[in-house]
Amino acid sequence: MPDIENMQYDSLLVIFKDILKKNNLKFTKQREAVLKTMYDNSDHFSPESLYMLIKKTYPELNVGIATVYRTLNLLEESHMVTSLSFGSSGKKFELGNKPHHDHMICNICDEIIEFEDEEIEKKQEEIANKYGFKHTGHLMQLYGVCSKCQQKQKRKEE
Amino acid sequence: MPDIENMQYDSLLVIFKDILKKNNLKFTKQREAVLKTMYDNSDHFSPESLYMLIKKTYPELNVGIATVYRTLNLLEESHMVTSLSFGSSGKKFELGNKPHHDHMICNICDEIIEFEDEEIEKKQEEIANKYGFKHTGHLMQLYGVCSKCQQKQKRKEE
DNA sequence: CTGGGTGCAAAGTGTTTGCACGTTG
DNA sequence: CAACGTGCAAACACTTTGCACCCAG
């Protein structure tokens, strides 16, 4: 499986078509619209918000939300997108075309800040090894209050 | 707020009653059954599995699953239990009476292994500070295959 | 032209809520 | 005895699925 970090859209598309072909699946306008929309609006999407954006961008396609779900699941299984588990309100998905990173999530405004730390990654590897655990992935999310919301809170207190 | 690590049941109960009193809530058999069952069967519970266990242990109470949800939410807000996000199939809850730790989750058998690493905790703190983020909690879960399941896989391959 | 894909609506999940009755303080 | 809590079932939110038609290969 190629490493899709930092790839341009054309290369992502080639990989996607390849995955489809290997699994006897077909390349459709709808499937492309999902990938393209995620690429063009690099962000963390809920299936719902992605669905709305696709409808707005490609009104002629008349995409259904079921297809968005189906495609996101397909892309996730193919490791082209990754998902973040979110408290209670479902998952968010992001296209995997950037270097690995984790997330800080503001409890107040839901803003997502990405960060990356090699040392922690190494440490995780060590821990897994210690327990004879074959480490295939992880989820690390820091929760708290982002700097903007902290300032808002201070202003209110005055 | 007291630190409920390593506490015996009696002390947990006192704290729980205290929280209830402070919020003008009542101490009921059902609420106690939830706390006691979690204490007696130290484990990671889905609301459903906890509900079943309570029904089995206290058949005379005729508890409803809605009460289990309500009580778990109450306990979580009061920081007496914590929850782990679980892929798509909801959350699991554990009583917070042990030292802080994170989780390794086997993708095959769903076994949960607890671990603790001070260095990572420190690093998380540093990262949050760097972004002006007020860090109030985190979720770190490593996914992979536990040693038992790796052995089973090997056996099949032979 | 055949098998997989799609939109739609219905069915599944997991969780929350309205209500009448029950219990706590 | 006032208020909060409970069980029940209905409602909810999110996601998956069955089906008839559609389209890519």
Image: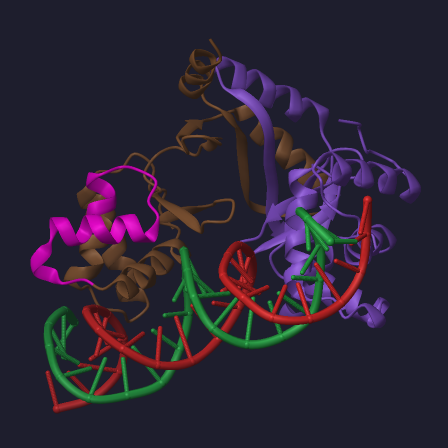
Chain colours: A brown, B purple, C red, D green
Residue A128 x, y percent position in the rendering: 67, 41
Left or right: where B120 falls relative to A32? right
Vertical arrangement, residue A75 with respect to residue A102, above or below: below
> What residue appears at the point 60 percent right and 57 percent down from the top-left corner?
B107
Tell me how many marks there are: 0
Q: Would you say residue B111 is visible in this rendering?
A: no
Quadrant in the picture for residue B102: top right
Foreground residue, C3 or B133? B133
Residue B14 x, y percent position in the rendering: 87, 38
Residue B74 x, y percent position in the rendering: 67, 45
Left or right: where A42 falls relative to A109? left
Vertical arrangement, residue B22 with respect to residue B88, above or below: above
The span shown in magenta is A37-63
Is A53 in the magenta? yes
Residue B89 x, y percent position in the rendering: 55, 60
Left or right: where A42 falls relative to B96? left
Foreground residue, B98 or D9? D9
